[in-house]
Image (spheres, rainbow, N blue to C red):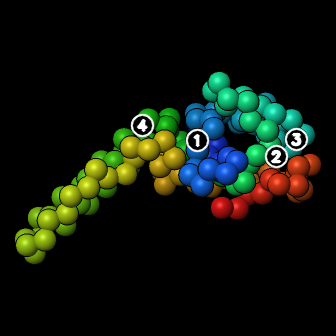
Amino acid sequence: MSHHHVIAKVGSDSKLRVLFVDLDANALSERFIKPYEKGTSFFSGNDLISPNDLRSVHIVRTERPDAVERDELNRKVRESIDRLNELGSGVFFLSVGGGYKPQDIAEAGVDVTHDFIKGAVSTPKCNTTG
């Protein structure tokens, strides 16, 4: 089963925000795509979001759930840092690695935004670029 995650910039905030995680294609369509394309507000957690407030949208597909994918991403980054530190160059790298922030899911999956959002959206402020 594929898991879909919606990441966006909302309003004047310049940071990416995860609106939805681990949705199947049907839930993605019902909870995000249909309201987005109609220009109607939708809930993300407890927040009511208007498509007019979306500055960018990215839909990412993964084969495993968000938590599993981000844990794996974190493991790989830590291993890479450990390998660099084992080279004995006298320089030591210290990092928490990736996978800790919810928006890191974008690094673990495939961008499928244009598979789901086609054509013009009824709200002029919406776009799918960052």
Mark 3 or 4, closer to the camera: 3
Which residue is label 4 attached to? Answer: 68
Instruction: Give the amino acid type for the residue marked by disc 1 in the picture.
Output: Val
**Mark carried by residue 31:** none
Q: Earlier in the sequence, mark 3 or mark 2?
A: 3
Q: Earlier in the sequence, mark 2 or mark 1?
A: 1
Vertical comparison of 37 with 85: above or below? above
Real-space Cα separation, disc 4 to disc 1, in angstroms:
16 Å
Q: Which of marks 3 and 4 is nearer the N terminus?
A: 3
Q: Residue at x 58, y 35 (%)?
A: 21
Whether label 1 touches label 3, CB < 8 Å? no
Is disc 2 placed on a helix, strand or loop?
helix
Q: Earlier in the sequence, mark 4 or mark 2?
A: 2
Whether label 3 touches label 2, CB < 8 Å? yes
Q: Earlier in the sequence, mark 4 or mark 1?
A: 1
The answer to whether residue 130 is visible is yes
Is disc 4 placed on a helix, strand or loop?
helix
